Amino acid sequence: MTNDLFRLVYCSRNTISADQSDPAAEIAKILAASRANNARDGVTGALLYSDGCFAQVLEGDLDVVQQTFERIQRDTRHGDVIVLEARRAEARMFGMWDMALAEPADPIKARSILGLALAEPNGDAGTTVVALLDGLVRREGDWASAA
Amino acid sequence: MDGFQSDADTRGTFNRFFPEREEQRAVLTQAVLDHAAAGFIGLDAASNVVLCNRVAAEMLGITPPQLWQPIPLSQYLRESTRLDKVGQLQFAAALHPATKFNRQSGLSAVDQTLQLTLLDGRFLQVIVHQVDANHSFVSLNVGAIGELPPERTDGLTGLSDRQWFRERLTERLMAPEQEDQVAVLLIDLDRFKAINDSHGHPVGDALLQMVAQRLRSVVRDGDLVSRLGGDEFAVTMSGVGAPEAMGHRLVDLLSRPYLIEGHVAVVGASIGIAVGPRDGADTSSLVRAADLALYQAKEDGRQSVRVFKQEMDTRARARHALLDDLRRALALQQFEVHYQPQTNLGSRQLVGFEALVRWRHPELGLIPPDRFIPLAEEMGLIVGIGEWVLRRACLDAMSWPGELSVAVNVSAKQLEDPNRLPRVVEAALATSGLPAKRLEVEITESALVRYEQQALHVLHALRAKGVRVSMDDFGTGYSSLSQLRSFPFDKLKIDRSFVRDLSNSDEAVAVIRAIAALGASLGMTTTAEGVETDEQEAMVRNDGCTDMQGYLVSRPVPAEDVSKLIASLTIDTPIFQESIR
């Protein structure tokens, strides 16, 4: 197995119900665990949570991305996982982030983009979601550096 | 274990030539045994201890006496300081000559495994190996609770194997606590074979490993996950639990995509659940119940969970009985051929009949074809039945006047051996004396697509003899237009579903018109099937079809009623038929 850079993009639906636990707290937990694991494994990426949907990008060596994804698949906090993209990539897009949190300024727009991707998971959907995440993350980065 | 497995004669010969080797062999064998990691106890036919290694003695907490002569196992075990009375009795009982061949417990006599609890809480694994009638030995391993011996572990996934699964299930069912239930979930992966075929075995194996890990990650601590073989797994849940909820969780989890070597693979899971002792008081019946539930889950479209219900057993037995009857039906002459007329839409003249097989069961009466044809195909009986129908139809057609044709259906299975059908047709024509041009052979579109190569060969061979060929149920398969051009068809039979939808679907009208036009331009007649009303007749005529078949003209009738039907259809009266039975 070669160790070229591999990128995986997926969407899923949240199954954490509000009366069982605080979704925000759960997401914080997911992020923390994700960042720790990824730092160790050399995986970078971004996670978006918006109105009941997750979207995530993972970048790294093929074997580690596979292991990471398999771990994510065993997590029962989400379901209806749809893989939008799974292929070799030229360069990392989220190189600075063990796992960036993308928080959309316009949740409705983000939700509709995700909804479209979930409804028609074709080749373009992956690119669209990555672009969405990229845009959101960069903005967060801009603010951080400006601070 | 060389000393046990050497052929006595060979050893005898060897020792005669090299007597000093006998002693050397004995010393070495003992040394090897004493350094083995597992405990070994060798027994004779009467289950007396003949040999015991140091480790076995340590495990049992027996100060090893020298075995000058064989000691009964029960007596030997009484010296054990590590095993309590119950354990000693269980151990001795398992090796009692009578028990060794006890099949009722569900354990095979050979390589029987026993788990005993030592006084210090660890467990003692006892595996019985029956060498021959006079020699057996047990291997002993001590482990932490729940530890699986290597012999019972599936090499690929690390899960316990089928035998372990059955043995643990037997133990649970024989346990005295009656409030405890044990649930068996049998899991079958859908589409796994397709993954193996398209991506190769390394990917298939990796997938199985991931499936095993996913299963492990979601079961509770006391539950057992086993790989029964191939793509079959089992989860054994004991005590109070919610097996159906677990089933649904597993289906969801296992159907999530897998990323393997850069490929995204998706499989599904079908799960059958049975709960003991309610659904089965012993291992075999409980596993059978779960299996029936699994069968139902697969029948119901896969990726589903089914819990055993008594009617599944009833239905399975009925199906089995019907299968048995079906096998004998041909020999017992329980089949009949009925004939349904085909008429030309333009001239309203009778052109021929389609031969349809019927099964008159002595107790159940006339069994509908959709109940026995799939069974016949599954069992391969359809070939014999189909050929019988062909011969019968040729004979019956000889008694009809004029040039009336007879059309016989050919099942996909009959195409598997492409040389057989043309031979059978030739023989049937020769025996009956029926001119080849009066015989039509009907093949469904889906059979054609499935066995394209063979079908091509068969159709050309039949055409060469002057027999005509039709494509049946056209519009329901996946044939391509290029296939239509390369196959020498005389007739296209438009599936009845299009005719049925004519009055409320513009698409149906368009499709029928297109097929009729296609037929006309390629020189094929087109028969509309399932015409039941005057309105439908008018519409199919309007759409360009050449012939029709359906209840409007007549239901299928037995051979003896055909001449009466021919008479009534050739008189120029309005088409009106009572059902003739």
Image (spheres, coloured by chain):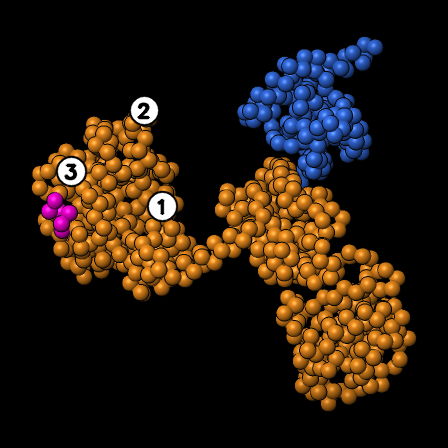
Chain colours: A blue, B orange
In this view, which residue lies farthest toward the front?
B179
* Tag 2 residue: B506
Q: Nearer the viewer, mark 1 or mark 3?
A: 3
Q: Residue at x 77, y 74 (%)?
A: B92
In this view, which residue lies farthest toward the right?
B63
Q: Quick check: do tags 2 and 3 share a chain? A: yes
- Packing grade of label 2 (10 A; few <14, some 14-19, many >=20) is few
Q: Report if residue B349 lies within the magenta region.
A: no
For the record, the magenta segment spans B563-568
Q: Give the residue type at disc 2.
A: Asp
* Tag 3 residue: B575
Q: Pick whichever, B192 or B579, lies toward us.
A: B579
* Tag 1 residue: B447
The chain letter under disc 1 is B
A116 relative to B321 in the view: left or right? right
Classify mark 1: helix, strand or loop.
helix
